[in-house]
Amino acid sequence: MKPVVAIVCDTSQQGPHVYHQVGDKYIQALVRCADVTPVLIPALEDPIAAADIFAIADGILFTGGYSNIQRHHYGESAAPDGEHEDPRRDKNTLALVGEVLKAGVPMLGICRGLQELNVALGGTLYPRVHEIEGRMDHREDKNAPVEVQYGHAHSVSTTEGGLLARVTGESQFMVNTVHGQAIRDLAPGLSVEALADDETIEAVSVDGAKAFALAVQWHPEWKAWEDAPSTKIFNAFGNAVREHKTNRTL
């Protein structure tokens, strides 16, 4: 059997019903580039215990999403009315991050997933990074075709000798940009793996992690098989998940 990667779902209200869901692009990247079997974990009001997730999963993917982390989790006042938040996801993912690291389960964070890692470990966010002087607008044009929204938008520079540089073999490469929030204060225990030209933190790793623990601000899952750095990120994650599965079954 292939190793299993668990993905905590977003929740959404559609009419009178609550749905638990994950974007297809994450699933496709895991299947095609990491060669694993994805399973979806519902974001319940009473979260599924980490030990029960680890009993079936060999790795965890923290995905991006249209919602923002509720601001009280990093010491900010409440967001303006109309901001899309997902308290159920917050409740599930923010608690799970520490358990993943303690258990030594490989993890990959993408966009919101990077922000969750930072907030869970005590860091803070810019609620609207485009309003910060000197920063560019990292949001997509929602009126553009999806291929344009997720097309290459700016470069990132990797930290020499860091995990991302080793995984991709690149000191600089182009990425897409589809986010309105970004890391402000880096959490203790995290190291910067890549920066944008405007000094926005684009990737981090966990110091002294027991297993693969990388998170990126862009969306490498978008047609990952057509982009060399993205393919390498998912390959590396898949290899770490396979190694973890092997070690825990010995």
Image (spheres, helix red, strand yellow):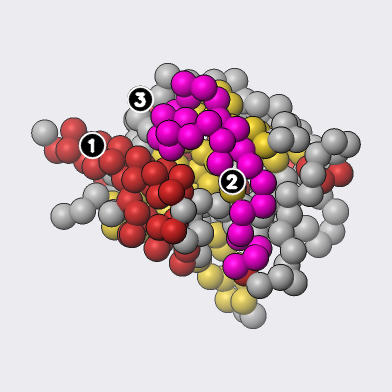
Q: Amino acid at mark 3?
A: Lys
| Quarter location, residue 1 | bottom left
**Alpha-carbon distance for marks 2 and 1?**
29 Å
Query: Of 155 and 204, which appears nearest the observer?
Result: 155
User: In this figure, which residue is indicated by the disc labeled 1?
Assistant: 243
User: In this figure, which residue is indicated by the disc labeled 2?
Assistant: 174
Q: Residue at x 63, y 42 (%)?
A: 155
Is residue 155 highlighted in magenta?
Answer: yes
Q: Mark 3 vs mark 1: give the one in front.
A: 1
Left or right side of 52 for 42: right
Which circle's residue, 3 or 2, is located before the other in the chain?
2
Left or right side of 35 for 207: right
Q: What secondary structure is found at the residue carrying circle 1?
A: helix
Mark 3 and mark 1 residues within 8 Å of each other at the beta carbon: no
User: In this figure, which residue is indicated by the disc labeled 3?
Assistant: 210
Q: For the magenta stretch, what is the residue range?
A: 147-174
Residue 161 pos. (x, y %): 46, 21
Which circle's residue, 3 or 1, is located before the other in the chain?
3
Q: What secondary structure is found at the residue carrying circle 3?
A: loop
Q: Mark 3 vs mark 2: give the one in front.
A: 2
| Quarter location, residue 54 | top left
**Alpha-carbon distance for marks 3 and 1?**
12 Å
